Image: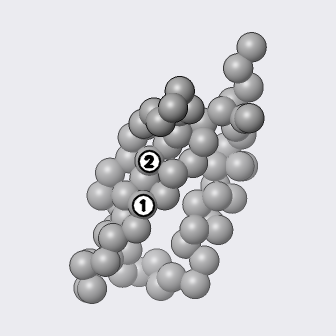
């Protein structure tokens, strides 16, 4: 049986990746899932509207 990661794990991972960023300037560009070597993950793309910087966050969908 596959064990999903919890919503708390998902939100904690996003918070850890956004630590120290001024969130007023960042927007979510895309949210989706992807697969790499049979491991599924959530893929979230963020873009800074002022500086045009981009940040990608990958969060595992399933527990190891």
Which residue, given by chain and number where applicable, does mark 2 sit on?
43
Q: Residue at (42%, 60%) from the top-left corner?
A: 56
Mark 2 Cα-neighbour bin, 10 Å: few <14, some 14–19, many ≥20: some
Identify the residue at the far front of this view.
Answer: 37
Residue 17 place in picture, x, y as percent: 57, 68
Residue 38 place in picture, x, y as percent: 53, 27
> Which badge, 2 or 1, comes first in the chain's sequence?
2
Mark 1 Cα-neighbour bin, 10 Å: few <14, some 14–19, many ≥20: some
Query: Which image quarter holds the C terminus?
Result: top right
Q: Give left or right: position of 22 versus 2.
A: left
Q: Residue at (47%, 85%) from the top-left corner?
A: 22
Which residue, given by chain and number where applicable, does mark 1 sit on?
56
Q: CA distance from mark 2 to mark 1?
A: 7 Å
Quadrant of the rendered image containing residue 32: top left
Q: Residue at (30%, 58%) from the top-left corner?
A: 29
Residue 54 place in picture, x, y as percent: 33, 70
Asked if the residue under mark 1 is in contact with the one under mark 2, i.e. CB atoms within 8 Å, the reply is yes
Residue 3, placed above or below residue 1: below
Residue 63 place in picture, x, y as percent: 72, 35
Residue 20, placed above or below residue 26: below
Q: Residue at (62%, 66%) from the top-left corner?
A: 15
Query: Which image quarter holds the N terminus?
Result: top right
The number of callouts visible is 2
């Amino acid at each position: 049986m596959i064990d999903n990661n919890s919503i708390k794990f998902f939100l904690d991972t996003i918070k850890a990746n956004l630590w120290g960023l001024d969130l007023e300037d960042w927007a979510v560009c895309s949210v989706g899932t992807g697969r790499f070597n049979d491991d599924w993950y959530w893929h979230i793309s963020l873009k800074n509207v002022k500086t045009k910087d981009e940040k990608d966050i990958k969060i595992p969908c399933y527990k190891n």
